[in-house]
């Protein structure tokens, strides 16, 4: 069974995954705006832009209201707060895991210090001769197939 809260969180993260939609949310952070004002700063067709708004609305991140012929959008930050809480939970979890790994590695380094291998220079060959290069010629032609 799908949890409604999880499904909403999936929609929020899907909406936030696109740079255009994140820019729209930034624009709306300064206050509501009409669709044409929002679309003006994006280099795309109006129908394409409205599809982005539909994704944001489905995620609950914006609310659209029609006033005559003008459609205004307002930011609703509540779903982003739920996403931030989810990220914060896992940030705390992984921070603890990485701290434990760091302590373990530090302990291992104290118990068994890493010995640096000192490389000795390889002795040069006493021979003054050179090795001939292989021939670059192709061999004799092979047998031909007759039909």
Image (cartoon, helix red, strand yellow):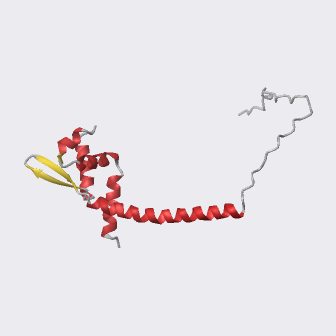
Quadrant housing residue 76: bottom left
Count of marks overlaid on the render: 0
138 sits left or right of 12 in the view? right
Residue at 34% across / 46% down in the picture?
19
Residue at (12%, 51%) from the top-left corner?
66
Question: Relative to residue 106, is residue 43 depicted above or below?
Answer: above
Residue nearer the viewer, 36 or 80: 80
In this view, the residue farthest toward the left is 68
Residue drawn 63% across and 61% down?
106
Q: Position of residue 116 (x, y in %)?
A: 74, 51
Quarter of the image for residue 132 reads top right
Residue 100, horizontal then vertical, whole percent: 56, 65
Q: Is residue 115 above or below residue 124?
A: below
- Relative horizontal placement of residue 8, taking residue 66 as reference (left or right): right
Residue situated furthest top in the rendering = 137
Instruction: Please state if 104 lies on the left or on the right of 96 as rendered.
Output: right
Furthest-bottom residue in view? Answer: 1
Residue 69 image position (x, y, % from top left): 9, 46
Quarter of the figure that contains the N terminus: bottom left
Is residue 61 shown left or right of residue 137? left
The quarter of the rendered structure image containing the C terminus is: top right
**Where is residue 135, by image quadrant?**
top right
Q: Give 8 or 123, whichever is nearer the viewer.
A: 123
Residues 100 and 79: in front is: 100
Give the x, y percent position of residue 88.
40, 62
């Amino acid at each position: 069974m799908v949890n409604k809260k999880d499904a909403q969180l999936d929609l929020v993260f899907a909406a936030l995954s696109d740079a255009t939609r994140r820019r729209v949310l930034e624009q709306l952070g300064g206050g509501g705006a009409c669709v044409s004002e929002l679309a003006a700063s994006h280099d795309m067709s109006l129908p394409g832009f409205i599809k982005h708004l539909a994704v944001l609305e489905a995620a609950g991140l914006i609310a659209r209201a029609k006033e005559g012929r003008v459609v205004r959008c307002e930011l609703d930050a509540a779903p982003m707060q739920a996403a931030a809480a989810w990220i914060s939970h896992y940030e705390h979890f992984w921070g603890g895991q990485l701290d434990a790994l760091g302590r373990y590695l530090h302990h291992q380094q104290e118990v068994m210090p890493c010995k640096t291998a000192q490389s000795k220079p390889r002795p040069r060959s006493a021979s003054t001769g050179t090795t001939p290069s292989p021939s670059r010629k192709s061999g004799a032609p092979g047998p031909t197939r007759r039909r």
